[in-house]
Amino acid sequence: MRRHDLLAELHRLLSPRSYLEIGVNVGGSMTLSRTRSIGIDPYYSLTQELLCDVHLVRTSSDEFFAREHPLAHFDEPLIDLAFIDGMHLAEYAFRDFVNVERFTHPGSVVVIDDMLPRDVPEARRDRSVPSGRTAWAGDVYKILATLRELRPDLVCLEVDTAPTGTVVVINPDPTNRALLEAADDVVESYVVPDPQDVPAAILDRRRAHQPEALLDLPVWGELVAARDLPVADARARVTQAVAPLRAV
């Protein structure tokens, strides 16, 4: 299954009330949305028909989230489903996740692309260096270890999608400041010369779920049901729903 197929299925299962995408490019993923949406990309050049109520923003994600009311296009400033596929560098993806999480609720889902490079050249930071691959994942994979170390409350599910893997993050918490407080040290640790030291568990997708099996899990319905609950009750329901996934 390819990354956009996974995203299409999540749109179907979650029926999100709001969708935010970082990295619109030609519109291949935004065309999957049927809900009120925001797309952020300083260089988007659409070749796909968009079939949703969308606000396209030609700016960087950092600038977008620095605005006073960045989610004014939505009925309320909450994101049900987000897709992060912007700059393929760990420090950018880290900031994107931190910024997106500020506007989530217990039932929100965040999908991050390019998280499972297939070899070390594909994980290079310098895109201009030939690698023998047509795809470029960059070193976005680094944020997975950060999330698991600093935010054990999050459920980070690696998914074996083509070509460069995805991670689905469940149980976000906008009140948790652990990532923000560690940001300077974390970002500094990411910026190192190529070749990158990619863990074997990433390269061989040792912990990756097969997308079809993941999509068959009952957790998605529980996340949808949690939207209508008070935050404390929603958190309790989601915590219970994701408990089996922590053991995988």
Image: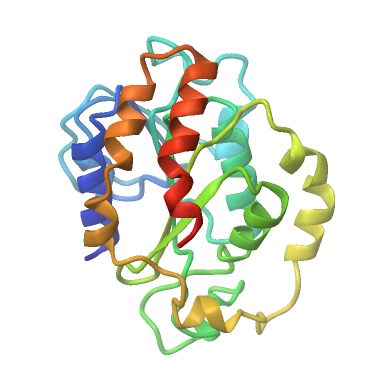
Give the quarter of the image for residue 53. top left
Figure quadrant of residue 91: bottom right
The quarter of the image holding the N terminus is bottom left
Q: How is the image coloured?
A: rainbow
Q: Is residue 56 left or right of residue 47?
A: right
- Residue at 24% over, 64% down: 2
Q: Position of residue 105 (x, y in %)?
A: 49, 25
Residue 168 appears anywhere in the view: no
- Residues 26 and 157: in front is 157
- Furthest toward the bottom, the residue is 132
Q: Residue at x 64, y 52 (%)?
A: 147
Look at the picture and state if 68 lies above or below 165: above
Instruction: Locate residue 209, reporting x and y percent.
Output: 36, 65
Question: In the image, 74: left or right of 216?
Answer: right
The reply to whether residue 99 is visible in this rendering is yes
Q: Residue at x 45, y 62 (%)?
A: 248
Q: Estimate the x, y position of residue 23 in percent, counting from the top left.
A: 42, 47
Q: Position of residue 201 (x, y in %)?
A: 54, 79
Compare residues 91 and 239 and report the one nearer the observer: 239
Q: Nearer the viewer, residue 200 or 165?
A: 200
Q: What residue sits 31% from the left and 27% below the top?
A: 224
Image height of 38 relative to 202, above or below = above
> What is the total number of numbered labels drawn onto the structure image?
0
